[in-house]
Image (cartoon, grey):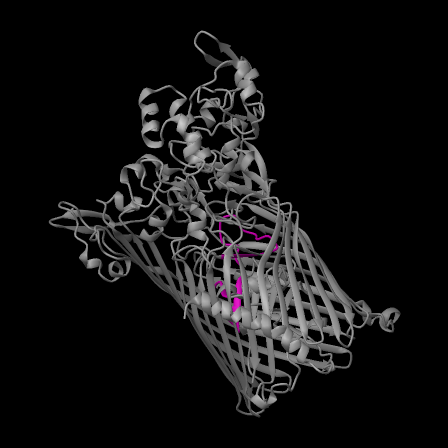
């Protein structure tokens, strides 16, 4: 059955059943009596009562995300934890998700937190775990809580507990499935066909070159016919054709849980089929997770967990981490916006036109660029828990994690890669596998005597990681070969005479070994005063023999004011607890063995011997550094937890200062050393901020409840020192985002936040009064004292009226790189989220918003699509329609100053620059937004309604994700950030557009 038919039938069925089932309800269902239990949270190797927590810990429980119909846990918890930023880099299926806890601490290395799933480290776990698997998520935010994880905890720790079964409970089967459709929410406005042709007329005719004038007339027609022809021509909206399809989603979740007197089990199955809004893109995932716990005796318990997932992300997308040449979005924006009329066949590939314009029909190009990225994840872990005495417990956990990545890429004959290789297709096959074995052994002693309670933890842990990578780049495949044929028949490639095929590349990933010993002591006196102290010692082979050991201590205290006599009997006060924590955490996220020199063999460094290539050896471009050591993060946190009116109002306030020193930086070094880079400990950063969480049950009636949760955070990040990473006594260095080669558009500077934009200030455009006019030569010359931006923005061509004008900041009368300045940063002033949950009888409704205020977005698309650069016949952003004009309504060039000024009296935009792409403040936009991320309406049948069918619970729901976004940002999405360098965040360049998702689903429990 057609996907659209299936989805529409499901939608109609749900819309019909919801009101019918509601009207069929004949009596009120009494609200279940709530039993208050002592909530526990996982804080690192053990659980503690939430009331006894002394650290900054954010928690998300299963009930908060169980009704969120999204494909990853990262999406489900976005905006729900204060101090945690979760951002998808773009809107593509399976898009990479960036998670930062309290701003991140590193400036060139990863700021991702450490993920622990059921006691085992697992990379990027929130992106690959389904929300239906989650029992709880705890985010450890300050070093007092993360230092127990030592070398890996500097950027926060995310502890994920997946659902398990319960003992002495019968088998329960739950099915949750939904289907829906995605649509693009907005497109980038471009010139319409008539505006496009009029702009081309100006480009071809402005300089009066006869050949150009003839070329225009041949391609587009005579001026007198343009209005009638192109105002009525068939328009081609390439963005709509490439991104405008209805993208369907089918998601199925099935779980079986239960247990006997001695055992408990849980089986979770998940299958997702999601089409992307871009043609030929999509996401597929199948996952199975099985957990089993068994009590061998009253003292001995064992259990194991097996998790396996297979994931496929299809489609080349719109961009890559490379420069402008990898931007596929450009073709959808800039390709000729009409069909017929010119001598360009828009639906056929014309190599000459591609060379002249640097463009290819986006639909043809999309069919010729194929990418399939497959990921298989395996997690196996088991534990043994032995109660030596009633107070002393030994626990051992062993886990194995394996990740297999496979990426198949195909470039067909119309792509620039193939055209550079004899117009023949190319295939690249990339494979990698990583394996991690973890073993953790702990002794936990807990004792309560009188007013005293102690909890001691002693542990040892080993982590070893290995892996391999391989890559095969095969050129000169048969021109008629299809992508799937090419992937399985690379042997069909035949190099032209005298050419040699690239040899496959293989490499073993440097082995990573970690040995740790740790201890923690917790003391509670009179249920009022709490002290927690911990220490961890890590040894890592990442560093040299003299620097391998790092020690990470922490201490935290808490005072339960509620338990003091002057507050103990206040019925309106549930909780009042003051917390303070101080701790040291580390970071060792650099490749191993960089403290010594190793040689790598490869055909890239080979030489010809006889008829073949003999591999050579090289040390690479990174100089060894035997002195490199741990990056260290010191965190201080002061917090207050409160609760009022028997749970009706609750929340917390946290203030923190996090200082990171000895930053692990990949520094550029003088090439006279024979190398280009070296890992060094250099520099300091600081993050300080406030977090506020507030929740409440506003209405709590028999048939109606209204609950709200709100959090808001602010974080100020600054660079305190750059150490030896700068030269010449400077306190800064420039960084390139990479969307254009050799454009240094960011600055890392002491006193500034990480991710500061760096460029020119837009002054507007040059007006007539900036020039002297020579009536004889009809030439405009800049007046003395008016700075010229010719060299910077206009390819050194003479400045004319209407050209882009930049501000002369240093007042030297010329525009040079000395006039560049800081243009803001991606760091928001504050951010957060709030959730509203309503229940009326058997109806439920939730609305979840997230927001960000004060962050700037670098709209690089805006620069590219308003700059002419080297090419004509390229469409432009719609703003260009309001540019400076040189031709009147009769197609006659106007040069007289008075007439030219009158012609442009109502225009505001400058002439698209002819020089290289530069960053100027025109492209820095306010990225503040308020997004209604999720709205869900559901109806649950009264209990017992379907018992005759064995159905215990039946819920229908309808959801809209990304319903609306209130923002002044003009790009696709204010949250887009497509560059991977921590120093260059907030760049929106060729991002895959975000979509709106409308779905309906059913939740059944048997």
Q: Is residue 291 magenta?
A: no
Name the residue: 56% across, 39% down.
924
Quadrant the C terminus occupies: bottom right
> Residue 324 placed where, x, y %?
40, 41
Q: Specify whether 685 is left or right of 31.
A: left
Name the residue: 55% across, 88% down.
171
Residue 790 appears anywhere in the view: yes
Number of dots carrying numbers: 0
Residue 813 appears anywhere in the view: no
Q: In this picture, is 555 found above or below 944?
A: above
In magenta, the rendered stretch is 97-125
Q: Give the camera-side residue of 209 and 500.
A: 209
> Residue 728 placed where, x, y %?
50, 32
Name the residue: 60% across, 76% down.
955
Q: In this picture, is 964 found above or below 291?
A: above
Q: In this picture, is 557 found above or below 323?
A: below
């Amino acid at each position: 059955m057609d996907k659209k038919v299936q989805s529409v039938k499901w939608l109609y069925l749900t819309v019909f059943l919801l009101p019918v089932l509601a009207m069929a309800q004949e009596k009120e269902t009494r609200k279940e009596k709530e039993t208050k239990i002592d909530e526990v949270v996982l804080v690192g190797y053990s659980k503690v009562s939430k009331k006894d927590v002394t650290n900054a810990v954010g928690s998300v429980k299963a009930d908060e995300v169980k009704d969120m119909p999204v494909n990853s846990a990262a999406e489900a918890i976005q905006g729900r934890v204060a101090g945690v930023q979760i951002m998808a880099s773009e809107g593509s299926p399976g898009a990479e998700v960036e998670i930062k806890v309290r701003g991140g601490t590193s400036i060139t290395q990863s700021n991702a937190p450490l993920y622990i799933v059921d006691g085992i480290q697992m990379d990027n776990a929130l992106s690959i775990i389904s929300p239906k698997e989650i029992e709880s998520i705890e985010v450890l935010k300050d070093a007092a809580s993360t230092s127990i994880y030592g070398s890996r905890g500097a950027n926060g720790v995310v502890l994920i507990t997946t659902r398990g079964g319960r003992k002495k409970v019968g088998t329960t089967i739950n099915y949750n499935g939904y289907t829906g459709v995605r649509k693009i929410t907005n497109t980038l406005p471009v010139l319409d066909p008539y505006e496009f042709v009029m702009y081309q007329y100006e480009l071809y005719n402005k300089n009066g070159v006869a050949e150009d004038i003839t070329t225009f007339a041949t391609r587009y027609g005579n001026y007198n016919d343009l209005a009638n022809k192109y105002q009525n021509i068939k328009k081609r909206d390439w963005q709509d054709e490439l991104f405008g399809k209805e993208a369907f989603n089918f998601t199925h979740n099935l779980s079986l849980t239960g247990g006997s007197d001695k055992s408990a089990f849980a089986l979770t199955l998940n299958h997702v089929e999601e089409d992307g809004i871009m043609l030929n893109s999509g996401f597929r995932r199948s996952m199975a997770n099985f957990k089993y716990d068994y009590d061998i005796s009253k003292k001995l318990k064992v259990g194991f967990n097996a998790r396996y997932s297979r994931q496929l992300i299809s489609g080349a997308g719109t961009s890559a981490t490379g420069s402008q040449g990898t931007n596929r979005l450009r073709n959808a924006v800039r390709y000729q916006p009409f069909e017929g009329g010119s001598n360009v066949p828009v639906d056929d590939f014309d190599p000459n036109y591609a060379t002249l314009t640097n463009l290819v029909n986006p639909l043809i190009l999309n069919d010729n660029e194929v990418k399939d990225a497959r990921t298989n994840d395996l997690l196996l872990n088991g534990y043994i828990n032995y109660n030596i005495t009633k107070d002393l417990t030994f626990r051992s956990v062993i886990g194995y994690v394996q990740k297999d990545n496979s990426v198949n890429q195909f470039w067909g004959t119309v792509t620039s890669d193939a055209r550079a290789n004899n117009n023949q297709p190319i295939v690249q096959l990339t494979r990698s596998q990583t394996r991690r074995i973890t073993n953790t052994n702990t002794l936990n002693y807990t004792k309560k005597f009188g007013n005293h309670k102690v909890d001691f933890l002693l542990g040892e842990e080993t982590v070893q990681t290995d892996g391999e990578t391989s890559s095969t780049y095969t050129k000169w495949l048969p021109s008629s070969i299809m992508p799937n044929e090419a992937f399985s028949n690379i042997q069909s490639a035949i190099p032209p005479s005298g050419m040699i095929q690239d040899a496959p590349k293989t490499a073993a990933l440097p082995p990573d070994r970690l040995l740790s010993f740790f201890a923690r002591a917790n003391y509670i006196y009179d249920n009022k005063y709490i002290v927690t102290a911990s220490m961890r010692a890590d040894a890592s082979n990442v560093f040299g023999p003299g620097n391998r050991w790092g020690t990470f201590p922490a201490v935290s205290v808490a005072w339960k004011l509620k338990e003091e006599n002057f507050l103990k009997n206040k019925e309106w006060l549930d909780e009042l607890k003051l917390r303070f924590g101080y701790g040291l955490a580390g970071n060792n996220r650099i490749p191993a063995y960089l403290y010594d020199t190793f040689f790598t063999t490869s055909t890239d460094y080979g030489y010809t011997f006889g008829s073949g290539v003999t591999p050579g050896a090289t040390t690479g471009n990174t100089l060894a550094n035997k002195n490199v050591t741990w990056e260290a993060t010191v965190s201080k946190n002061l917090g207050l937890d409160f609760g009022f009116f028997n749970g009706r109002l609750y929340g917390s306030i946290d203030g923190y200062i996090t200082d990171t020193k000895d930053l692990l930086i990949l520094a550029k070094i003088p090439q006279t050393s024979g190398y280009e880079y070296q890992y060094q400990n250099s520099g300091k950063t600081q993050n300080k901020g406030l977090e506020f969480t507030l929740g409440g049950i506003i209405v709590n009636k028999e048939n109606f409840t209204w609950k709200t949760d709100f959090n808001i955070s602010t974080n100020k990040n600054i660079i305190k020192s750059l150490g030896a990473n700068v030269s010449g006594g400077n306190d800064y260095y420039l960084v390139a985002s990479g969307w254009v080669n050799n454009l240094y558009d960011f600055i890392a500077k002491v006193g500034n936040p990480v991710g500061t934009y760096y460029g020119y200030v837009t002054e507007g455009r040059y007006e007539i009064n900036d020039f002297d006019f020579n009536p004889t030569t009809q030439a405009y010359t800049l007046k003395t004292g008016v700075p010229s931006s010719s060299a910077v923005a206009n390819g050194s061509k003479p400045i004319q009226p209407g050209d882009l004008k930049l501000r002369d900041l240093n007042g030297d009368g010329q525009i040079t790189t000395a006039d560049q300045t800081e243009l803001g940063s991606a760091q928001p002033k504050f951010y957060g989220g709030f959730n509203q949950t309503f229940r009326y009888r058997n109806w439920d409704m939730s609305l979840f918003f997230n927001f960000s205020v004060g962050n700037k977005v670098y709209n690089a698309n805006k620069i590219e699509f308003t700059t002419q650069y080297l090419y004509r016949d390229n469409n432009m952003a719609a703003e260009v329609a309001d540019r400076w004009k040189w031709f009147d309504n009769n197609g006659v060039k106007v040069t007289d100053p008075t007439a030219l000024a009158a012609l442009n009296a109502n225009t505001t935009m400058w002439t698209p620059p002819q020089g290289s792409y530069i960053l100027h403040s025109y492209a820095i936009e306010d990225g503040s937004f308020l997004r209604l991320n999720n709205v869900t309406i559901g109806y649950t049948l009264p209990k017992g309604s379907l018992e005759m069918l064995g159905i215990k619970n039946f819920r229908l729901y309808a959801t809209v994700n990304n319903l609306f976004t209130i923002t002044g940002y003009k790009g696709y999405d204010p949250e887009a950030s497509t560059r991977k360098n921590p120093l260059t965040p907030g760049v929106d360049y060729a991002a895959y557009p975000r979509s709106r998702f409308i779905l309906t689903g059913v939740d059944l429990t048997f």
